[in-house]
Image: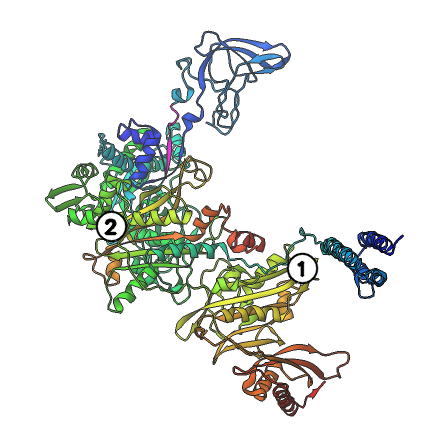
């Protein structure tokens, strides 16, 4: 909301600077988003009188002027305009002045003639979009005076963001009341002006059916108005306040609203059929609003209707049909109190905002309902003529006008704020319309009707706090709470200990992408109002998000990516919604770049498996990896379930080629995911003595059928080796030249150790023989 | 020439020749050969000594003394030359093994934490230090926890501030982390507990806003403390401690009266602009202040909604936007960078 400084000053004689007003407004809780300073913007432009005018010797279109600006010597100015004569008074931008357009005036030579300033048009002063010729000032303009001052340009326009609880401050009157109280200045309260009614003009009386939504509705008919454009001063005021002039009648209502805070509406009386009603919309009722939108109304919508149909969505917008225009002769003015909840509900349902609805939904000052109607009527009659009928009153404003009383304790408020509340503050609150009786510790507060937001003791704490100033409240540390130390979640920290970069993607994805990894089982959670189709369903896998990030980066000259994400997945579980914390990885493309010490290589399954394994190891967990060709979206033969104990805690694999291609990734892409909520607790480390006697290491290389898997071979070796085995692992895998078709060569390296003695050749021979026998027998393998 | 003289002369020549040869030796191997040639069992010195038998017995000790002196002299010369040659050999080895120390070191894998995660961790750590308990809540919420219990009435304009994502069954994506406040207090009461309670709740929140300065998903940290005689002065104390700790310098803070349905009084919190130290710059629009979070004293209706007696207990609460603070701390100009996930950006910011 924009309010010109002069409007505030018309209510209370503020003497302090613009900056001080800004500080006071902020301290009182009215956020100032910006300040425009039209007068200051033309500082340095003064009234000058042309005392001489001769043609430029070298340019037909230019004139050489001598302009008196109240200094000893008139200024020589070269001017390109032609609409001025000797004796005219014009705005002169002196050397050093910066005009609103950004141009700074310098002493200069134009076609050989020196110029000490510039005579300005309205456009150059920022007063009009464009202009022809100079702005000729009236003859009584004092030479040498700042033009901004002479023209009465606004000193400042405050751009305010009024909080939703302060409808009373959405006007010059309301804000001035706050400032006057704070600065201890007299306040010119809005007064009731009564026009003489014309008995021959009969105002329609509204029937209020929805009394809950509209406790009071005033209407007045004015006949014989001559609607012209509103006067220039009013249009300028509206523009300063950020509203566009519409027509004479509407402008008066808007101007009055900005001034007093009460939104009003005008109907073209000749377009209304019969009497008015304030009621909820009927079934199937529709309505074309002023902005041209056709609204399907519901029984939640409060409307003003004539005998035929709705003519306004109450407190929000009138209908197109009943609107006032240049041809209107007879009007009906409306001024009412609509309940905030009703206006807010309809406004949000229909997605509309208007200056009126912004005020009604915050709660207007009930005292202004009639004052504003009377003031607006007077301005209309003064400007456009017309005969006003009597004000017809439906309902009773006293229903909203009642003052509330709050009983509370000074000590409670002081405890809440952490600062004493001196009695002097009571007087400021009294000037703001409260009436306060303080007796020892007890406070009895009578709240003005326009303060819809003050109802309980805590509200008064806020009133006291903002008068005292939040900055005066001391800073104190609260009593600290001793508590046990909780473990910090280090899931991500552990995951980026390798080369992975943590990413964060949106929790909602396209339904189509969901299907890449999760079959359609009806357990998707679907947003009713997504930003777009690509953000419609809650993800059940982190992989689509990671694939999109991979695509984004591969398209930006990255040779490879290693990503990890920590986030939730979401799904329906019967009647409830389940959210699980996941950790997911993606690796694709170059794993290691060419270096002077080694050639580069691409990421493969075992890079990713190693990363997941390392993560699990740091949690002191060991996993089993079970090949699974049925995992959706993963390539059969390169996919596995991850088991920890009996729990299926995750998946790993290569992304199916068609899915990778969907993300424009033409290299192998590997993904993994762990469900953190299903992971068991790792066991804390137990002490085991370090072996004192040396171990013996042996290698055995076997030829297996291709389908034999490493895990089973190692288990067989472990069983055959017995208690001397310290470690056994696959150190070499080979198939190809030298190995028969359908076979695979696997090298097993094992270490034997005894805690009590050094092992002999005989010991290791015996174990080797046992291993060979077991492996040959179990897998039909042969020693190479 | 007597035998003795002849022998002495032979020895002199041998000594001179040996010293010459030693000095000329080019390597340790050659030097060893020279040692054998001159000093070995069948060496030249032994050869010379064979002539001693021809000397008169009284002359023999004289020549013996000379021979011993030569032996010692040559042994020392050998050792000296050996040291010289060893030094040369070592120098050669060093030259041969010279490397280019400017070649890059072998790459260790280098991961990066997301700057938002970094911010969340730093922020929660500060509150943990003050004895706050970390809590989390569901991201899919119901209207009661997200709005009603927080004193946000169904028709209240505040609900328009929160443009909410809904599911068909009426559930919604939480628009702030404040519902964790409700859940934490509810669970305290359900366990039969009473205040004091102090909680920090980091998490993801969602609003239907998507443009230059809004992301439909972002992160908040909700902080609240309830106890006897908790006042606004405590709120200011904790805010000052938190903001100064997070930004690593004692920042001026300013509280402005504002409005939130769940606090009374409510305050917007500004910090002295971190870019210009409050002097006024483009970022703070010349005001010297930056708005960073909303705060206040918990509204009695909120305490009532969770079954805490607001006449006995009071509390403060505030909620802060993680991305905003991270942007201010690290000078990140655009919110969208956080969710574009360009690894070049993430690696640069990551730690």
Q: Look at the image and say whether residue B273 sits in the magenta stretch.
A: no
- Helix, strand or loop at label 1? It is loop
- For the residues labelled 1 and 2, say whether their Cβ atoms are less than 8 Å apart: no
Between residues B206 and B124, which one lies in front from this camera angle? B124
Chain of the residue that carries numbered disc 2 in the rendered image:
B
Between residues B62 and B10, which one lies in front from this camera angle? B62
Which percent across, then down, holds residue A537? 49, 65
Which percent across, then down, holds residue A735? 72, 79
Question: Magenta segment, which residues?
Answer: A152-159
Q: Residue at x 45, y 50 (%)?
A: B326
The answer to whether residue A673 of the structure is visible from this angle is yes
Which percent across, then down, holds residue A618? 49, 69
In the rendered structure, the answer to whether residue A732 lies left or right of residue B59 reads left
Res. A474 image quadrant: top left
Give the answer, above or below, for where A57 lies relative to A508.
above
The mark closer to the camera, 1 or 2, is 1
Res. A29 image quadrant: top left
Q: Which mark is residue A593?
A: 1
Res. B126 image quadrant: bottom left
Colour scheme in use = rainbow
In the rendered structure, the answer to whether residue B228 lies left or right of residue A630 reads left
Predominant SS of the magenta segment: loop
Chain of the residue that carries numbered disc 1 in the rendered image:
A
Which percent across, then down, holds residue B309? 20, 60
Give the answer, above or below, for where A129 lies relative to A293.
above
Between residues A428 and A239, which one lies in front from this camera angle? A428
Determine crowd level at label 2: few under 14, some 14-19, many 20+ residues with C-alpha closer than 10 A.
many
The span from disc 1 to disc 2 (Cα, nearest Å) is 59 Å
- Helix, strand or loop at label 2? It is loop
Q: Which residue is mark 2?
A: B231
Between residues B331 and A9, which one lies in front from this camera angle? B331
Q: Residue at x 51, y 51 (%)?
A: B336
């Amino acid at each position: 909301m924009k309010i010109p400084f002069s409007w505030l000053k018309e209510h209370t004689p503020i003497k302090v600077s613009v900056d001080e007003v800004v500080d006071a407004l902020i301290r009182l809780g009215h956020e100032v988003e910006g300040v425009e300073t039209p007068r200051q913007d033309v500082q340095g432009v003064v009234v000058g009188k042309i005392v001489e005018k001769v043609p430029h010797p070298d340019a037909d279109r230019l004139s050489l002027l001598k302009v008196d600006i109240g200094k000893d010597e008139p200024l020589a100015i070269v001017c390109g305009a032609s609409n001025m004569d000797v004796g005219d008074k014009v705005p002169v931008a002196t050397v050093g002045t910066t005009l609103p357009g950004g141009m700074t005036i310098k002493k200069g030579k134009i076609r050989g003639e020196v110029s000490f300033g510039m005579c300005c048009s309205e456009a150059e002063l920022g007063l009009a979009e464009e202009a022809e010729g100079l702005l000729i000032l009236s003859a009584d303009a004092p030479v040498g005076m700042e033009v901004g001052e002479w023209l009465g340009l606004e000193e400042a326009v405050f751009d305010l963001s009024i909080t939703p609880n302060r409808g009373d401050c959405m006007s010059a009157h309301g804000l001035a009341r706050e400032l006057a109280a704070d600065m201890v200045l007299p306040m010119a309260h809005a007064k009731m002006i009564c026009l003489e009614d014309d008995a021959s003009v009969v105002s329609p009386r509204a029937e209020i059916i929805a009394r809950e939504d509209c406790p009071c509705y005033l209407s007045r008919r004015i006949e014989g108005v001559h609607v012209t454009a509103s006067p220039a001063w009013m249009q300028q005021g509206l523009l300063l306040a950020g509203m566009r002039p519409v027509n004479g009648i509407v402008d008066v209502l808007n101007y009055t609203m900005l001034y007093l805070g009460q939104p009003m509406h005008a109907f073209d009386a000749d377009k209304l059929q019969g009497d008015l009603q304030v009621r909820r919309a009927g079934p199937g009722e529709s309505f074309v609003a002023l902005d041209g939108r056709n609204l399907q109304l519901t029984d939640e919508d409060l409307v003003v209707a004539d005998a035929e149909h709705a003519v306004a969505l109450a407190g929000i917008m009138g209908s197109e049909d009943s609107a006032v225009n240049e041809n209107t002769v007879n009007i009906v003015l409306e001024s009412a109190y609509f309940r905030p909840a009703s206006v807010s509900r309809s406004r949000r349902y229909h997605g509309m905002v208007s200056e009126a609805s912004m005020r009604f939904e915050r709660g207007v000052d009930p005292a202004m309902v009639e004052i504003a109607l009377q003031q607006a009527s007077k301005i209309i009659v003064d400007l456009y003529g017309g005969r006003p009928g009597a004000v017809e009153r439906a309902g009773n404003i006293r229903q909203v006008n009642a003052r509330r009383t709050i009983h509370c304790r000074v000590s409670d408020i002081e405890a809440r704020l952490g600062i004493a509340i001196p009695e002097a503050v009571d007087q400021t609150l009294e000037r703001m319309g409260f009436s306060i009786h303080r007796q020892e510790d007890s406070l009895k507060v009578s709240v003005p009707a326009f303060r819809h937001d003050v109802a309980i003791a805590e509200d008064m704490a806020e009133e006291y706090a903002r008068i005292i100033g939040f900055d005066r409240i001391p800073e104190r540390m609260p009593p600290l709470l001793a508590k046990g130390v909780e473990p910090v979640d280090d899931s991500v920290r552990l995951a980026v200990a390798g080369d992975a970069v943590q990413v964060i993607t949106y929790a909602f994805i396209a339904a189509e992408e969901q299907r890449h990894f999760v079959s359609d089982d009806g357990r998707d959670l679907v947003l009713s109002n997504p930003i777009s189709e690509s953000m419609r369903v809650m993800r059940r896998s982190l992989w689509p998000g990671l694939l999109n990030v991979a695509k984004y980066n591969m398209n930006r000259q990255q040779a490879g990516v290693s990503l990890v994400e920590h986030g939730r997945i979401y799904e329906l579980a019967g009647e409830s919604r389940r959210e699980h914390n996941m950790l997911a990885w993606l690796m694709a493309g170059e794993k290691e770049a060419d270096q002077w010490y080694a050639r580069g290589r691409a990421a493969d399954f075992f890079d990713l498996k190693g990363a997941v394994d390392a993560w699990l190891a740091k949690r002191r967990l060991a996993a089993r990896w079970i090949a699974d060709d049925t995992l959706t979206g993963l390539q059969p033969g390169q996919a596995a379930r991850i088991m920890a104990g009996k729990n299926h805690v995750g998946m790993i694999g290569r992304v199916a080629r068609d899915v990778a291609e969907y993300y424009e990734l033409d290299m192998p892409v590997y993904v993994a995911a762990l469900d953190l909520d299903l992971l068991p607790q790792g066991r804390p480390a137990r002490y085991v003595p370090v072996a004192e006697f040396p171990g013996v290491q042996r290698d055995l290389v076997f030829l297996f059928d291709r389908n034999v898997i490493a895990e089973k071979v190692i288990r067989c070796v472990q069983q055959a080796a017995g208690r001397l085995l310290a470690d056994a692992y696959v150190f070499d895998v080979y198939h190809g030249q030298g190995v028969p078709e359908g076979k695979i060569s696997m090298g097993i390296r094992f270490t034997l150790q005894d805690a009590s003695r050094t092992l002999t050749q005989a010991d290791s021979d015996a174990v080797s023989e046992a291993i060979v026998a077991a492996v040959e027998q179990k897998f039909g393998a042969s020693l190479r | 020439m007597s035998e003795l003289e002849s022998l002495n002369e032979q020895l002199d020549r041998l000594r001179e020749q040996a010293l010459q040869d030693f000095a000329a030796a080019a390597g340790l191997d050659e030097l060893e050969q020279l040692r054998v040639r001159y000093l070995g069992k069948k060496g030249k010195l032994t050869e010379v000594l064979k002539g001693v038998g021809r000397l008169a017995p009284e002359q023999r000790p004289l020549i013996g003394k000379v021979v011993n002196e030569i032996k010692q002299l040559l042994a020392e010369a050998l050792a000296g030359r050996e040291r010289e040659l060893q030094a040369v050999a070592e120098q050669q080895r060093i030259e041969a093994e010279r490397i280019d120390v400017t070649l890059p070191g072998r790459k260790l894998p280098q991961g990066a934490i997301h700057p938002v995660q970094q911010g969340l961790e730093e922020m929660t750590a500060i509150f943990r230090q003050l004895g706050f308990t970390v809590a989390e809540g569901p991201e899919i919420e119901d209207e009661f926890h997200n709005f009603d219990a927080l004193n946000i009435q169904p028709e209240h304009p505040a609900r328009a501030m929160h443009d909410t994502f809904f599911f068909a069954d009426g559930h919604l994506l939480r628009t702030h982390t404040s519902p964790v406040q409700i859940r934490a207090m509810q669970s305290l009461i359900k366990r039969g507990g009473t205040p004091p309670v102090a909680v920090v709740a980091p998490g993801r929140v969602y609003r239907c806003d998507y443009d230059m300065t809004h992301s439909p998903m972002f992160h908040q940290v909700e902080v609240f403390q309830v106890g006897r005689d908790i006042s606004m002065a405590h709120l200011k104390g904790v805010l000052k401690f938190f903001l100064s700790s997070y930004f690593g310098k004692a920042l001026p803070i300013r509280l402005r009266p504002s409005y939130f349905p769940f606090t009374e009084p409510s305050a917007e919190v500004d910090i002295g602009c971190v870019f210009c130290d409050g002097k006024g710059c483009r970022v703070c629009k010349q005001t010297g202040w930056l708005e960073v979070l909303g705060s206040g004293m918990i509204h009695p209706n909120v305490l009532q909604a969770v079954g805490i007696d607001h006449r006995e207990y009071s509390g403060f609460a505030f909620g802060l936007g993680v991305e905003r603070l991270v942007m201010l701390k690290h000078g990140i100009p655009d919110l969208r960078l956080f969710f574009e996930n360009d690894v070049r950006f993430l690696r640069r910011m990551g730690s």
